[in-house]
Image (spheres, helix red, strand yellow):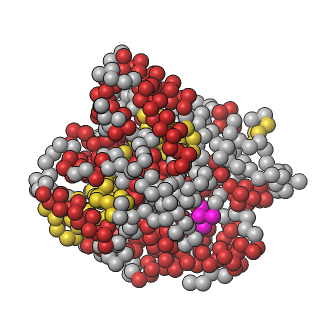
Amino acid sequence: MSKDLHERSLRELAAGLAAGEFSSLELTEHFLARIRAHDGELNTFITVCEETARDQARAADERIRKGEAGPLTGIPLAHKDIFCTQGVKTSCGSFMLDNFVSPYDATVVEKLAGAGMVMLGKTNMDEFAMGSSNETSHYGPVRNPWDTERVPGGSSGGSAAAVAARLTPAATGTDTGGSIRQPAALCGVTGLKPTYGRVSRWGMIAFASSLDQAGPMARSAEDCARLLAAMAGFDPKDSTSVERPVDDYPGALDRPLEGLKLGLVEEFFDEGLDAEVAAAVETALNELKRLGAEVVEVSLPHSRYSVPAYYVVAPAECSSNLARYDGVRFGHRCEDPKDLEDLYKRSRAEGFGAEVKRRILIGTYALSAGYYDAYYLKAQKVRRIIADDFRRAFEQVDLLVGPASPEVAFELGAKADDPVAMYLSDIYTIAVNLAGLPALSMPAPKVRGLPTGLQLIGDYFDEARLLNAAHQLQKVTDWHLQRPQGY
Amino acid sequence: MTLRRDEVAKIAHLARLAVEPEALEPLRDELAGILRLVEQMDELDTDDILPMAHPLDMNQRLRPDEVTEENRREAYQAVAPLVENGLYLVPKVIE
């Protein structure tokens, strides 16, 4: 029997479509059926778009028949519900936007649709991307397919779990402090956060604008390379989009790793790291060495200040960005407001969940008169120190390596009542966002039957090298091919 | 750093978030916990450091002064809670 459709790579799917082995409509029906069968338990989707998916699949089949297909034409994917999708509910995981049907498409959505991809639906996420477990979603937690009593990580938890459970071949995510890499690690998939400015933020609901970046999540680095090739590029609609040609990511995958210099980040192997996760990361590193990479220890001496600095910068930007939810132009509005202030205050109090409110309040405090220097300005200075650490490290090595998460997936509810413990889940990912660098998480060996993530961090705009190293490792290992039982 | 109850109430007002009086106390504890984490920054001497507002050294791009957007008022107002004759309706502001 030939390989199941949901076990095939994007390259294999494109070949099957081109050869007429199956149609995009058949492929789409296959994944829609898997979503119907499994998503009741996992809760990875907020919205499933059966009808529009079929329409897009038929259009893709037409393109393929006419010989106008690209490498992604006819392949299904899921978008994190943070991306605006015209005519489709875009909730951002929040009751505030439960009634919001976007009047336009995000650039990422437009680009992937233009490449002929079929949107299966919108994935569950932490509310406004604020969370590391997917438990802050208004639509209920996502369950990790490796153990449904555990979290998938967050905030792109729905995308990670849907890819891991083979409910979609690929998904989009966003990463403000680790929201692609940490769930990728906890669900055993590959996820890339590109350099800040590489992928357009237009139509991606803003959380912290100097940190937010969209990226691909899939089962392999090769799949991510194909997706990033379609997602990346200059967009005049995003004022921080970078005018710079997009590298040939798929074309760079096959370069040998001979002579690649990897820096093992000393500070990432601290007392907070689960010893078995550390061993899994070292196993993956040894494979990279066997492929010809050289590993040296490097130091990012100020990395432990990244979480404190982030919890000023991100909430400050969040409090400003989320000021737009005022109950006037879109989103939730309270009943019978007695005056304008009551309208604002009650609409926001009813529309936002507890974690979003905490961050708005912290950000408001940090930006308020008398506290700006002590918090916001201080955090911006610490941010510079952290970025300088990376700059010095990249004078010595090509890529940095370490774990993506200090532990495997934790149990639902384990940290839900302790915000600070939850924040520390992103201890190895946050510094990258402060600096604006690209990084990916890819599966390392399982620990106690659960996935772990190897994190690779690149210099600015060095996504091609990151994906190349990850692909070479995946060619000689099978951690990324293992699938959760029952899916 | 201790945060007073009335400070929490003030921040909530600045953020335009309604908070029930009985919620102020637990909220104060949560916020104080986050601020304790944040204040670890104080261990670092940052006197001569230039603040970093943004990851990339870039200037805001200028574009030609041309009309590029079409008027999509109806599409945007279709998702508004309350509109009339193309206007967003809110409670009376001026008596």
Q: Which residues are magenta?
A: A354-359
Residue at the far top: name it: A66
Vertical placement of residue A326 versus A391, above or below = above
Picture residue at 62% right of the left edge, 54% below the top: A138
Can see residue A244?
Answer: no
Q: Position of residue A265 (x, y in %)?
A: 26, 69
Towards the viewer: A350 or B38? A350
Asked whether, in this view, residue B50 is left or right of residue A281, the answer is: right
Q: Position of residue A351 (x, y in %)?
A: 68, 55
Q: Position of residue A329 (x, y in %)?
A: 69, 45
Q: Position of residue A221 (x, y in %)?
A: 29, 46
Vertical placement of residue B68 versus A43, above or below = above
Asked whether, in this view, residue A324 is left or right of residue A23, the answer is: right
Vertical placement of residue A231 versus A349, above or below = above
Picture residue at 65% right of the left edge, 52% below the top: A95
Can see residue B22?
Answer: yes
Count of marks, rendered view: 0
Magenta segment includes A355: yes
